[in-house]
Image (tube, grey):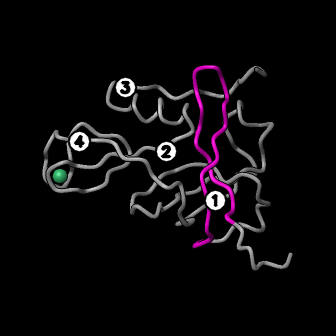
Amino acid sequence: MKEYKRPLPITTFWSQPFWEGCKRHELLIQQCKICNAKLFYPKLFCPSCLSSELGWIKSGGKGKVYSYTTVYGYQPEAFTDDIPYILAVIRLEEGVQMMSRIVDCKPEDVKCDMNVVVVFKDVTDEFTLPMFKPLLSVFKNS
Ligand SMILES: [Zn+2]
């Protein structure tokens, strides 16, 4: 595997299932077993009812761009080779929001409310990062 020079996630025991899911190319989110609230990022307690009875469910991996920015400069040095790149907040169909990158998309083509789908990037033997790419309509002509 090619050397990966960018920072890697720092895992916690409560986020470990999320990263293990990514490695299997599954996007997992938490769901409260008491009030059924869906949660992301990984937490120890449900912010709705304060229960610690949290489970994991598999997201369909589809969502919409809620907000985004394109990075053209002043990025951390490790990301210099990536500019320009798109950072976005994705609202998943399950209702939770996730910050990630939009890939396979020119900066001028990204739009708020654009449909996206997760893609998994195996960056090291240990880590796979979830990113999102445009989910193109089969009716689009271009
Ligand atoms: Zn709850």
Q: Nearer the viewer, mark 3 or mark 2?
A: 2
In the foreground, 67 or 53: 53
Residue 102 on image: x %, y %: 67, 54
Gap between marks 3 and 1, in whole Å? 28 Å
Q: Is the CB–ligand 1 distance for label 2 below 8 Å?
A: no
Left or right relative to 42: residue 59: right
Residue 12 bears which disc, if any?
A: 3
The kind of residue on which mark 4 rests is Leu
Query: Is most of the magenta stretch helix, strand or loop?
Result: strand
Q: What residue type is labelled 2?
A: Leu
Q: Earlier in the sequence, mark 4 or mark 2?
A: 2
Q: Rate crowding at label 2 as few (under 14), some (14 to 19) or many (20 or more) other CA atoms within 10 Å.
A: many
User: Which of the two labelled residues, at mark 3 and mark 1, occupies the earlier sequence position?
Assistant: 3
Q: Residue at x 66, y 23 (%)?
A: 124
Amino acid carrying label 1: it is Thr
Q: Outermost residue toward the right?
A: 142
Could you give the CA–CA distance between mark 3 and mark 4, rounded to whole angstroms? 15 Å
Q: Residue at x 14, y 51 (%)?
A: 34
| Spatial separation of the CA atoms under disc 3 and disc 2 | 17 Å
The amino acid beneath tag 3 is Thr
Mark 3 or 2 closer to N-term? 3
User: Where is mark 2, residue-wise?
Assistant: 27
Q: Looking at the image, which is closer to me, 26 or 106?
A: 26
Q: Where the N terminus falls, by quadrant?
A: top right
Look at the picture and state if 12 lies above or below 64.
above
Distance CA(mark 1)–CA(mark 4): 32 Å
The boundaries of the magenta stretch are 112-135
Specify the quadrant that holds the C terminus: bottom right
Specify few, some or many for label 4: CA neighbours under 10 Å numbering under 14, 14-19, or 20 or more: many
Looking at the picture, tell me which residue is in the foreground, 114 or 94: 94
